[in-house]
């Protein structure tokens, strides 16, 4: 399988799509394509190594199964092992220098928000930005509630829906996830282009919360 910087063949994309056939809906192949697009926009603006970046974007959630980031510690560790094996096997098929394959693998390994890792490469920083953008804006709202529904997480706390008098607990309340993670993402973007995109999407999140608060108050006793 030959790899060219600006050409992703249908065959290559079909091979990637197969890696996500068991993914949960919030981390399926459509998520991968959105992150790929975000990464391409940012990468071209920031002067990234595009083969490294785009491969990392396509493979960053490979083979993680239907309980992505929601299971026990053992389940998460098993998912990490499956992802590493799948990425290594995929990269072995691609005509890419070994040092670039190592950069792809590194960007994938450090991309998660929950890890709190500051990437040391531009491509790692861009992948973090691209992935975080998909947790923001209109798509991010849909993904948050899709994930919350899949784990039977309640919509919001009736006593304090918008975390005005308490710390957010997104283990219990779906709306708390906005305050625990989503609204914090803009300040954690690395690249100039990523920050610009995040600013627009953060406005969508805040507008949604404002509209939601007005609707909830309309029906308060």
Image: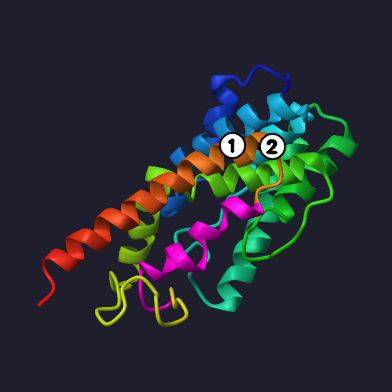
Q: Position of residue 27 (x, y in %)?
A: 47, 50
Q: Is residue 3 above or below residue 93?
A: above
* Colour scheme of the rendered structure: rainbow
Q: Position of residue 131 (x, y in %)?
A: 58, 46
Of residue 190 and residue 37, the one placed in the foreground of this image is 190
Location of the C terminus by quadrant is bottom left
Q: Would you name the residue on which mark 1 appears?
A: 196
Residue 19 visible, this orientation:
no
Left or right for 81, reference 143:
right
Q: Marks 2 and 1: CB-CB under 8 Å? A: yes
Left or right for 124, reference 213:
right
Q: Is residue 91 above or below residue 147?
A: above
Q: Residue at x 68, y 65 (%)?
A: 115
Label 1: few (<14), some or many (≥20) within 10 Å? Answer: few
Label 2: few (<14), some or many (≥20) within 10 Å? Answer: few
Query: Could you tell me which secondary element the residue under label 1 belongs to?
Result: helix
Location of the N terminus by quadrant is top right
Label 2 to label 1: alpha-carbon separation: 6 Å
Examine the residues drawn in magenta and state their main secondary structure.
helix
Q: Position of residue 61 (x, y in %)?
A: 58, 50
Q: Residue at x 40, y 81 (%)?
A: 165
Q: For residue 7: magenta?
A: no
Which residues make up the magenta segment? 171-188
Q: Would you name the residue on which mark 2 appears?
A: 192
């Amino acid at each position: 399988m030959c790899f060219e910087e600006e050409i992703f063949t249908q065959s290559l994309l079909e091979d990637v799509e197969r890696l996500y056939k068991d993914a949960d809906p919030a981390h399926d192949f459509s998520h991968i394509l959105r992150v790929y697009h975000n990464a391409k926009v940012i990468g071209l603006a920031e002067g990234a190594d595009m083969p490294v970046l785009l491969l990392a974007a396509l493979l960053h959630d490979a083979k993680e199964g239907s309980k992505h980031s929601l299971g026990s510690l053992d389940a998460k560790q098993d998912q990490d092992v499956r992802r590493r094996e799948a990425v290594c096997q995929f990269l072995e098929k691609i005509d890419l220098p070994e040092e670039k394959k190592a950069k792809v693998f590194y960007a994938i390994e450090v991309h998660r928000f929950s890890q709190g890792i500051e990437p040391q490469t531009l491509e790692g920083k861009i992948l973090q930005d691209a992935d975080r953008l998909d947790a923001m804006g209109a798509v991010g709202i849909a993904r948050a509630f899709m994930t919350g529904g899949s784990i039977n997480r309640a919509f919001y706390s009736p006593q304090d829906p918008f975390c005005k008098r308490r710390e957010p607990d997104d283990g219990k309340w779906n709306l708390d996830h906005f305050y625990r993670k989503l609204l914090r993402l803009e300040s954690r973007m690395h690249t100039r282009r990523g920050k610009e995109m995040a600013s627009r999407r953060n406005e969508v999140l805040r507008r949604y919360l404002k509209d939601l608060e007005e609707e909830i108050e309309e029906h308060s006793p």
